[in-house]
Amino acid sequence: MSTSHKLFSEAERYIPGGVNSPVRAWRAVGGHPLFIQRGRGCWVIDADGKEYIDYVCSWGPLIAGHAHPQVVAALEEALKRGTSFGAPTAKEVELAKFIVENVPSIQKVRLTSSGTEATMTALRLARAYTGRTKIVKFAGCYHGHSDALLVRAGSGALTFSQPDSLGVPEAFASHTLVAEYNDLRSVEAYLKAEPVAAVIVEPVPGNMGVVLPEPGFLPALQTLTRAYGAVLICDEAMTGFRLARGGAQEIYGIEPDVTCLAKIVGGGLPLAAVGGRREIMDLLAPLGPVYQAGTLSGNPLAVTAGLETLKIACHPGGYERLQELGVLLADGLRAAMREVGIPGCVNQIGSMFTVFFGVEEVRNYAMATACDTRMFARYFQGMIERGIYLPPSQFESAFISLMHTEAEIAETVRAAKEVFRGLRS
Ligand code: PMP
């Protein structure tokens, strides 16, 4: 029995499902999860000492790879000064300023400890600002696990306005209206029918696997929300500082009213952010009547890791490099699929990608859920055997870091081709 297997059996005795976040349990692909003892650059090393090329990157934060010397050195310095004060520190101002200077739609920003808190606060702000209650989200977009947003969140219940989780009152879920991604009419129908406080969107969804916005979709969404007086919330937890300094909103030329950031802004420590137009953000306590708080918000270690990671990510040429590597990998995987004769497609933008099986294209949730998840599970296991660590579910984005090189991409494509051959039988 491997050390990971032994550890997992023990974990199951003390932790529900053996994990502290469900997808880590590998239920969608079978088997038991790897326990990771160490990370280095774009590699992770499991409890038995086996090395893997890492495309999970802690689900997005590690754009600079594992244990980057610059991040580690800054953290060591910060650690010596103390772990938390619950009082303002200079570095959190520096991080807030960095965000405001790089994301033009953000005039002010509040730091939180998780993406869930950021989106929850964004909704509360939008409701306070508009005096309205209903919100519109898109099927397959995930915005954390708060009550209002666990509705068709990329898994579970498919029924209109049904919560995806037991324990979410129907009455809460009934305020959440679910539109189809890349389908403007489905949004406008709601906006026309009743007052809507906010439309929240992953501008480039990663939580149904990577799905790209069709040309004009996001700008039209902005026009629509403005016309109907709803707040546009871009949840860039994944895409913020991942696709560009200014996130997906920079690439697609939109200016949302409120933006949620997470993952990269915390550089692998628990930190996220909600920011936006000054008149909306100034509704937050202590300036305004919208309450939001956090014992560890703006934690000095998290702020330090975030700031150093952002400096590395925003180094000139960084995003061009990631796009280059992303295209190389996606093209390689597509060619391997074609050559071997495996039906499927690869969605990629910059350093985010997902391989879908059994479908020619994926443009929304319905198309994503039509793909062959059993084949994905076999692909995942084949890649693990060959030392490639991918997200253990079809409905996730894989991530490339600045530490990946052409050599790891070539190794990944070679392994994938072998696995694809096995999938034919
Ligand atoms: N929004 C998006 C787009 C996400 O991808 C995630 C997490 N994957 C969240 C919100 C929730 O963030 P957290 O897990 O930090 O609560």
Image (cartoon, rainbow, N blue to C red):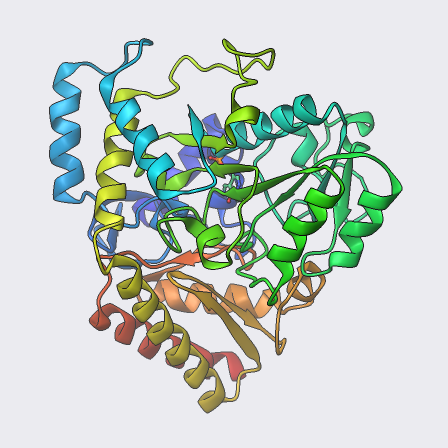
**In the foreground, 211 or 228:** 228
Residue at coordinates 12% horizontally, 42% vertically from top-left? 69
Q: For residue 42, say whether it is visible.
A: yes
Label count reads: 0
Q: Position of residue 97 (x, y in %)?
A: 31, 31
Location of residue 183 with respect to 225 vertically, above or below: below
**In the foreground, 80 or 99:** 99
Residue at coordinates 64% horizontally, 63% vertically from top-left? 368
**In the foreground, 256 or 6:** 256
Q: Position of residue 174 (x, y in %)?
A: 82, 33
Q: Position of residue 366 (x, y in %)?
A: 72, 62
Q: For residue 6, say whether it is visible.
A: no
Taking 267 as reference, is 258 left or right?
right
Taking 412 as reference, is 136 left or right?
right
Taking 198 as reference, is 274 left or right?
left
Most distant residue in the right direction = 193
**In the foreground, 320 or 83:** 320
Residue at coordinates 65% horizontally, 45% vertically from top-left? 153
Location of residue 396 with respect to 103 vertically, above or below: below
Taking 144 as reference, is 70 left or right?
left
